[in-house]
């Protein structure tokens, strides 16, 4: 099983909106950095994490891993092209 460590920087407004769901996605550490929080997660699926991340992506930044940035770009490309990977 692959386990990924994810570090993100999130504006406090987005943190408030996350509520308790952040724990469902593997949050294990959160430190305050001005109006931002640095959050650390352990996750088994970058795709699932990426889908959740898109809900607040305009108020956050991926620190690591770079693979998560790739997942996000691929999800956005699917949204933009309206090809959602479903076969007909």
Image (spheres, grey):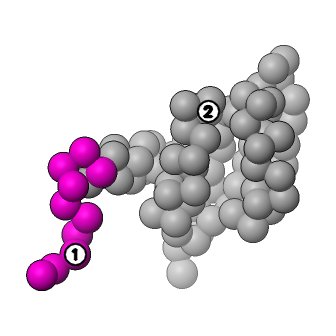
Q: Check disc 2: other Cα within 10 Å, few if <14, some if 14-19, many if 20+.
A: many
Q: Quick one: 3 or 71, which is closer to the camera?
A: 71
Disc on res. 86: 1
* Screen quadrant of the C terminus: bottom left
Q: Alpha-carbon distance for marks 2 and 1?
A: 29 Å
Q: Position of residue 58 (x, y in %)?
A: 55, 31
* Screen quadrant of the N terminus: bottom right
| Nearer to us: label 2 or label 1 | 1
Query: Label 2: which residue?
Result: 60
Vertical position of residue 17 compared to residue 27: above or below: above
Element marked by disc 2: strand
Picture quadrant where residue 66 is located: top left
Vertical position of residue 79 compared to residue 39: above or below: below
Find the magenta span and give its range: 79-88
User: Which residue occupies 33% across, 46% down?
Assistant: 76
User: Which residue occupies 84% across, 58% down?
Assistant: 20
Question: In the rendered image, is residue 69 in sight?
Answer: yes
């Amino acid at each position: 099983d692959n386990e990924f460590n994810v570090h993100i920087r999130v504006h406090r407004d987005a943190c408030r909106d996350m509520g308790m769901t952040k724990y469902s996605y593997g949050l294990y550490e959160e430190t305050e950095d001005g109006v931002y929080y640095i959050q650390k997660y352990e996750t088994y699926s970058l795709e699932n994490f990426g889908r959740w991340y898109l809900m607040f992506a305009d108020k956050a930044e991926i620190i690591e891993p770079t693979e998560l940035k790739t997942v996000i770009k691929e999800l956005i490309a699917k949204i933009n092209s309206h090809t959602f990977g479903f076969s007909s």
